Image (cartoon, grey):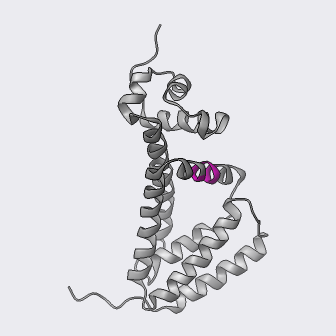
Amino acid sequence: MGRKRTIDREELMKAVEAVARRDGISGLSIDAVAKEAGVSKSSVVYDCETKAGLLAAFTRHQLAQHREKFDAARARFEGQPNSCLKALIEEFRSAPTEEDIAMALLLSVGMGANAECRDIMRAEMRRDADNIRTEAAEPYKMLRTLLTLHGLAFLEFYDLHRFDQITRNEILDDLMAIAESDKGAPPSSD
């Protein structure tokens, strides 16, 4: 019996991840992903066209999963000033797992290999910064808080330094206090 001709998008992304983890980004290919997923090469080509398309689809997929968790966290701060920044701070309460670190490194390599992946990540970062700027009474103060938060994330997700949970919580508590000290942007007069 031959390979399946169609593939579920989630299954395709699992195959991309499995190949990239096993063989690295340099070993990621349409053929390898098709074999891992048990589908025809033409099915993968139809969905993603090229290796660059695979990387871009994988980056979008990972960001969509992150955005889903973030949106749930943001809902807890609905109606409060600086809900975006507060949700981002809360999302970092747990230290990254080995799996999180491996995924961050994988995405980083993908961004290094593919301009479209960098553009996707830039757009995501810009969206957060724009939301934070728009929500704040003191936008630059809140953006500096975001920058501090991303510095902590960078150190931990790239496995350069790990903060113990007490220190992490103290840092995040300080950042949350800054976010809460800002009364938020005045209501728009549309």
Q: Nearer the viewer, residue 174 or 140?
A: 140
Between 34 and 68, the one lying in front of the other is 34
Residue 57 is left or right of residue 165, and the answer is: left
At a point 60% along the width and 87% down the height, the residue shown is 177
Q: Taking the image as drawn, is residue 44 in sight?
A: yes
Is 46 above or below relative to 100? above
Give the vertical position of 35 relative to 126 (above or below).
Answer: above
Give above or below for 66 relative to 161: above
Q: Where, by quadrant of the figure, is residue 75 drawn?
A: bottom left
Question: Given the current orientation, which residue lies at the most extreme top position?
Answer: 1
Drawn side of residue 38 relative to residue 153, left or right: left
Residue drawn 42% across the image and 88% down it: 184
State the extent of the magenta-drawn residues as a range: 103-108
Q: Main secondary structure of the magenta part?
A: helix
Identity of the residue furthest to the left in this view: 190
All told, the count of numbered labels is 0
| Image x and y of residue 138, in percent | 46, 91
Q: Position of residue 14 (x, y in %)?
A: 54, 36
Q: Nearer the viewer, residue 129 or 80?
A: 129
Q: Quadrant of the C terminus?
A: bottom left
| Residue 23 among magenta residues | no
Q: Position of residue 26 (x, y in %)?
A: 60, 37
Name the residue: 51% across, 57% down.
66
Residue 77 seen in this snapshot: no
Left or right, residue 188 beside residue 89: left
Image location (x, y in percent) of residue 142? 51, 84
What residue is shown at x 50% (from left), y 25% (from top)? 34
Compared with residue 13, is residue 103 higher up or lower down, i.e. above or below?
below
